Amino acid sequence: MIPRMIVVTGGAGFIGSNIVANLCESGAWDVVVCDRLETADLGKWKNIAKHPIADFWEPEEMFEQLERHADRIEAVIHMGAISSTTEPDAELIMRTNYTLSRDVWDWCSLRNVRMIYASSAATYGDGEQGFDDADDLESLSQLRPLNAYGYSKFFFDQYAVRQAERDQAPPQWVGLKFFNVYGPNEEHKGSMKSVIAQIWPKVAAGDAVSLFKSHRQGYEDGGQLRDFVYVGDIVAIIDWLLLRSDISGVFNAGSGKARSFADLAKATFTAAGKEPQINYIDMPEAIRDRYQYFTEARMERLRALGYDRPSTDLEEGVRLYVQNYLSKPDPYR
């Protein structure tokens, strides 16, 4: 019997390639990657090179291929996006993050195919409204993203909820608001890599790393807090959702526990077997007024629906990343 097919857009990227690895390991599906590999030197192709994917589609042929294989497709896991919060081309962001997502949604709805897509904690803006993932239109409309990337995700979340209320939705649809995800296969992301990946060369060399001083009362230097979530936990949530086709909605995807950048840096040194060396530098004045000091995913809604896997502790997640990946001479082999 020919297996059903799961299509992962952005499947050669950071989170997407980890999802692909897990799906391929299960052997239950034919896994198709739709993505741009860009240049060979960038290395995105390495993220999927050791996994037995069934096919690779370029984005320009995606809808032709979706239609061609419509009878076999179980789900589209839509991770493809411009994820840079500093991308200056707002029209490009909207075309990629909203318009394409809308068209994938409409196709899945028409063809009765499940859809899981990447939303973002950037929809919460400065966090003044909190981090409650209530997904009714009134609650969603209260959020105020701080950049075009966050706006594109915010706008699509509203489209999804509105269409679902009109019974014009895929049989299962889930948007996941990713918080600060870290883990293997993010090397191609450049300046958008996790802090762990960015400080790793200095940690490995035994040099000191630099973190921002605090410019807000109540926070120590390096004490700015983020919800850091190991990519394996994101994969586990998606794996569970594929087993729970009765669940739809927009949900947070984080650890549920805020930790400081200093904690993160210390955990990286510890995982490398080195004493922490941290310098604190002034935050650039240009970003001081809009710098976010706290994020923390509220995970109660997903937990209430039955997701009971514990989140990976920060120190354990960093250890896994450092010892099983970053410290290896060639982590792709």
Image (cartoon, helix red, strand yellow):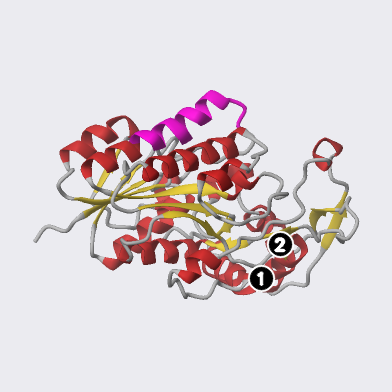
Q: Which mark is residue 227?
A: none
Please give the range of residues in magenta: 87-103
The answer to whether residue 246 is left or right of residue 65 is right
Name the image quarter holding the N terminus.
Answer: bottom left
> Residue 93, image x and y in percent?
52, 31
Q: Main secondary structure of the magenta part?
A: helix
- Considering the image in quadrants, where does the C terminus appear? bottom left
Label 1, label 2: how far apart the Cα atoms are:
7 Å
Could you tell whether 275 is left or right of 318 in the image?
right
Q: Amino acid at mark 1?
A: Ala
Q: Secondary structure at mark 2?
A: helix
Can you tell which mark lies on residue 203? 2
Where is residue 45 shown, x and y percent of the image? Answer: 40, 46
User: Residue 322, percent across and down?
Assistant: 59, 66
Per the image, label 1 sits on a secondary structure element best described as loop
Q: Is residue 125 above or below residue 321?
A: above
Dot 1 and dot 2 residues touching (CB under 8 Å): yes
Label 1: which residue?
272
Q: Is residue 41 visible?
A: no
User: Disc 2 residue type?
Assistant: Val
Q: Is residue 96 magenta?
A: yes
